[in-house]
Image: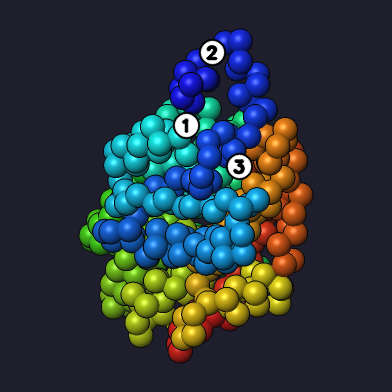
Amino acid sequence: MNRRQFLNSGALLSLALASGRAFAVPGDIVLGQSAPLSGPAKDLGVEMRDGALLWFNYVNARGGIGGRNIRLETLDDGYEPERTKANTDAFVKKNVAALFGYVGTPTSLAAKPIFEQANLPFVAPFTGAEALRSPNHPLIFNIRASYFEETEHLVQHFWDLFQRKFAVVYQNDAYGQAGLNGVVKALGSRGAKVVATGTVERNSANVEAALKAILPASPDLVVIVSTYGTAAAFIKQARAMGSPASFASISFVGPTSLANALGKDKAGVMVSQVVPLKGVGIFSEFARMLPAGTAVTPVALEGFIAAKVMTDVLKRANGPDGLLTALNNTNVDVGGYRVKFSPGNHAGSKYVDLSMLRADGSWAV
């Protein structure tokens, strides 16, 4: 009996919810990931995948999970929702154990009706959008902090510096709207409002309209909710036009790629981070395992952390303890970064820190 027939059997539905899908078929434990491996946002997908593979390959070299390898199968979606739908359909047909490490808000939302229909766990998406968090969803397990938590930290930091005029440049989709909503919420709790907004299109570096919307308001801070190419284009052009504003972004921007894209304009740009970039064991472990000459990037570190959490879940899902049951009873410390799930709370971590780019490309954390 294939999984679709199994799940469509009303008599066995409750068993399907508790059983270990990861162990339903012999061979590798296959996880499906849809992510941009091409296009303007490709660094995000490549880094998220490679960080996860670093850990999964390590586990497999030491016997895997009860002698079974964890195989991460990644399909390119170019950060386009329609391609994500097709990829997710393909994963369902292949009977993957879970969907893991999807990259992006609009892409994850495009996959949502499909994994709901298939009753397939959706673990560690690279997004902090509330639409994938609230209300708590029985199949979605978020490891990272939310965009609301990230924007609250950013607003608090600059508010403490007595900056009061906040503008937002946001991607014209669900991701951008989520970031904008976070800034609006954080300012609203302080009795303030956004002074200007501008939009940019997904996978585009055309920022002319956004510049025209933002710069006349003379903001103290511009929060940019997009990916690295668009953010870099806006910051470089705004500075070339004489803007004295500070610039900040949230973690999805791709901090390392943003630094590379900014070149000489990188100094002083602030980015919120949802993984620790110093001072804890997970950072040191990740750095040690990287190939010689490879730099630590926050996105790859997030993929590494997600893979460690997923491995812990898979170990506990063996036998009568099913995958969803194991996910719902997760409480793991991966080198100082704790992730905890319960049936009523699938927000694994609230960790947020801020970092600022130095002129030499390093981060001040």
Q: CA distance from mark 3 to mark 1?
A: 13 Å
Q: Secondary structure at mark 3?
A: strand
- Where is residue 314 drawn, in percent x and y? 64, 47
Q: Residue at x 45, y 65 (%)?
A: 50
Identify the secondary structure beneath mark 2: loop
Q: Which mark is residue 141?
A: 3
Quarter residue 11 falls in: top right
Given the image, on which type of amino acid does mark 3 rest? Phe
Q: Amino acid at mark 1?
A: Phe
Would you call the spot at circle 3 few (<14 residues within 10 Å), some (14-19), or many (20 or more)?
many
53 vs 362: above or below: above
Residue that appears at 49% across and 26% down:
3
Give the label, 2 or 3, closer to the camera: 2
Quadrant for the C terminus, please.
bottom right
Label for residue 115? 1
> Does residue 331 show up?
yes
Q: How many marks?
A: 3
Find out whether the residues at labels 1 and 2 contact each other: C-beta distance under 8 Å: no
Q: Residue at the location (68% across, 41% down)?
A: 317
Farthest residue toward the bottom?
Answer: 360
N-terminal label among 3 and 1: 1
Q: Which of disc 2 and disc 1 is earlier in sequence?
A: 2
Residue 55 at what x, y percent from top left?
57, 64
Name which residue type carries label 2.
Ser
Question: Which is more N-terminal, label 3 or label 2?
Answer: 2
Q: CA distance from mark 2 to mark 3?
A: 25 Å
Which circle marks residue 3 in the picture? none
Name the residue beneath numbered marker 2: 9
Left or right of 191? Residue 103 is left
Asked whether the residues under the numbered discs 2 and 3 touch, taking CB atoms below 8 Å apart as contact, a structural biologist would say: no
Would residue 348 be visible to someone looking at this image?
no
